[in-house]
Image (cartoon, rainbow, N blue to C red):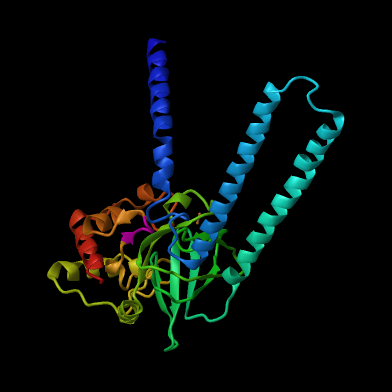
Amino acid sequence: MWQQLNNDIQRTRQWQRGLGLLPLTLLVACDGQQSTLNPAGTGAESIATLFWWMCAGGVLIWAVVMGIALYVTQAQPGAHGIRSARWLILGGGIIFPVVVLTALLSYGLMLMPPLRSTTDIDLRVDVSGEQWWWRVRYQTEAGEPVELANEIRLPVGQRVAFDLTSPDVIHSFWIPSLGGKVDMIPGRTNQLVLEPTRTGTFRGACAEYCGTSHALMAFPVVVMEPAAFSSWLASQAQPAQAPETALQRQGQRAFLSNGCGACHRVRGTEADGTVGPDLTHVGSRLSLAAGTLPADVEAFRRWIGHTGEIKPDVKMPTFGMLPDDQLNAMAHYLKGLK
Ligand code: CUA
């Protein structure tokens, strides 16, 4: 019982500390790589402006209502006649809300057409939400699309149209710093247009609960200067780099002989699976397992050997039965796929 009491006290103290940190947390949440209030795209700028107007309006109305409530506690009984009381109800209860809500609704609707416009598109990217990762396909002028996974790079100042879909369940595609979110619905293609306004690295996430590992489904978004973007896309279109060291060659043999190529494609090799992420340039990506792990050799080894522990219910089987030297060689091979 004393143990229980002690635990309760501890928990209460943690709560109190947590509450003390709340204002700080709210401030910190406005900054960073994944914030609608620190916009880096035209869509996010409109959303942030709308939010601040709504917020200011809400605070103002709250202050007026509190003022009236305070006044009522101080006023003498019978200080106002029945006529003025009726006017207060009519004005405060009907006229004021109708005027304010109509104004806010009109303003919100006014912001929408430019956000939804699909004209003057500079780049097209297809993204498919899978369990639990992102298939990304860049449409290129050469005709052959470039497929990669779990990372999106965009040229600053250009309008990008995303065609969003899903083969399994509903996901939701959201890059808070750049714009609003759009659902990815099986059997449909939804469109979202984003226009980044400054360079940087941001974080995108799935915004619709889609199963056990919904929270492990993120992706880095890198906004680059157009020239740097073009050379990045050109490098992604190249076939995979051949392994350079003996360890990487051993890793490639292990990768091919254990059947990894049935699900994964490494362009330029016999691995041509399409079920899982394209790994042609996986070593150049900023994260592993859709924003779940850092992209270093150690993380590759952990991922292959403990897949289901790291991302519960993922479709990729765990290859924990492989000897350590094979896991290590595979990790070096994959990290070498720049
Ligand atoms: Cu995909 Cu949640």
Q: Which residues are magenta?
A: 287-291
The image quarter in which residue 268 lies: bottom left
- Locate residue 314 relative to residue 168 in the image: left or right: left
Q: Is residue 1 magenta?
A: no
In front of the other: 76 or 145: 76
Q: Residue at x 23, y 61 (%)?
A: 331
Q: Residue at x 42, y 19 (%)?
A: 8
Residue found at the far left of this picture: 246
In front of the other: 113 or 162: 113
Give the quadrant of the C terminus. bottom left
- Locate residue 212 relative to residue 239 in the image: left or right: right
- For the image, the number of numbered tags is 0
Residue found at the far bottom of this picture: 142
Q: Is residue 290 magenta?
A: yes
The image quarter in which residue 219 lies: bottom left
Q: Position of residue 227 (x, y in %)?
A: 32, 80
Q: Residue at x 18, y 71 (%)?
A: 249
The image quarter in which residue 169 lies: bottom right
In front of the other: 102 or 194: 102
Residue 319 visible to an observer of this rendering: no
- Locate residue 244 relative to residue 184 in the image: left or right: left
Give the quadrant of the N terminus. top left
Q: Position of residue 76 (x, y in %)?
A: 74, 20
Q: Residue at x 59, y 65 (%)?
A: 186
- Locate residue 299 relative to residue 161 in the image: left or right: left
Q: Position of residue 284 (x, y in %)?
A: 28, 68
Q: Position of residue 20 (x, y in %)?
A: 40, 30
Residue 57 visible to an observer of this rendering: yes
